[in-house]
Amino acid sequence: MRPSPFWVNVLRMASNVKKIAPKKSKFHELLQAQVGNEFSASQQYIALAVWFDNEDLPRLGSHFYKQALEERNHAMMIVQFLMDNDIAVAIPGVDTPFNEFKSPRDLVDLALRQEQQVTDQIVGLAKAAREEGDYIGEQFMQWFLKEQVEEVSSMKTLLTIMDRADGNMFYVETFLTRESVGDEGGDSGAPTAAGGKL
């Protein structure tokens, strides 16, 4: 059976259409860099979790293992966004995590500073999207902005509890057993992660 002349013309036109290459922007370049930042943050949280596990502080260890997965998922959400927008993705290497600490408080302080740094990076991404008139990119960043408010707040709370415990880690472990710091449950508005969330 031969295709009708209409379909022959449609196929001929389709073969003549040039594929328009996606425009690569400053926002997309910053997103690529943020993939590496999120993976580096994940590795740093793994280093913190292992340190706490080595010190027989299982609740703190568990808390930071979860944080590591969360950061990995953030990276994969960005990867999925880039792929969905026909932007080639290159997975970068990660920074070497810091592993030398004097006290448990040092680890939580580092985690807070890391979240504040990531917040600055996310704000920079949102600004770049807005400046370039990338409304889809700006909308994508809104979830991350909201997430960073929660991340910084939960690390501040954990650092406050650590200071109030005055070196008694049993109090901190008990607090984490009782409370859900930074674990507000799944967010139905969260972007899709490439390969699925872990």
Image: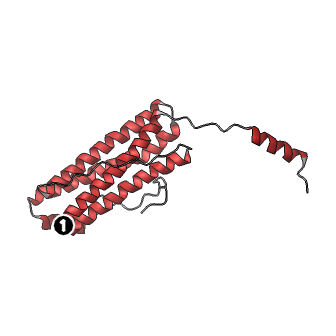
**Residue 196 visible at all:** yes
Q: Total number of numbered labels? A: 1
Determine the residue located farthest toward the top in the rendered image.
131
Badge 1 is on which residue?
54
Front residue of 8/104: it is 8
Quadrant assignment for the N terminus: bottom right
Whole-percent x, y for residue 136 in the image:
52, 41
Q: Can residue 159 be seen in this view?
A: no
Rendered view: 61 above or below 19: below
Q: In this view, does 147 lie to the left or right of 102?
A: right
Apparent side of residue 87 relative to residue 94 in the rendered image (left or right): right
In-image side of 82 versus 66 (left or right):
right
**Residue lying at 66% horizontally and 39% vertically, measured from the top left:** 19
Q: In this view, does 139 lie above or below 53?
A: above
Q: Is residue 62 left or right of residue 134?
A: left
The one nearer the camera, 171 or 134, is: 134
Specify the color scheme.
secondary structure
Type of amino acid under label 1: Asn
* Image location (x, y in percent) of residue 152: 28, 49
Local secondary structure at mark 1: helix
Residue 195 location (% of width, % of height): 49, 59
Query: Residue 34's quadrant in the figure?
Result: top left
- Where residue 117 appears, x then y in whole percent? 29, 42
Q: Which residue is drawn at 28% across and 56% down?
A: 45
Q: Quadrant of the C terminus?
A: bottom left
> Which one is nearer the viewer's eye here, 188 or 112?
112
Q: Is residue 171 above or below residue 159?
A: below
Other-residue count near label 1 (Cα within 10 Å), few / some / many at <14 / 14–19 / ≥20? few
Residue at image x 43%, y 57%? 187
Relative depth, front residue between 196 and 87: 87
Figure quadrant of residue 5: top right
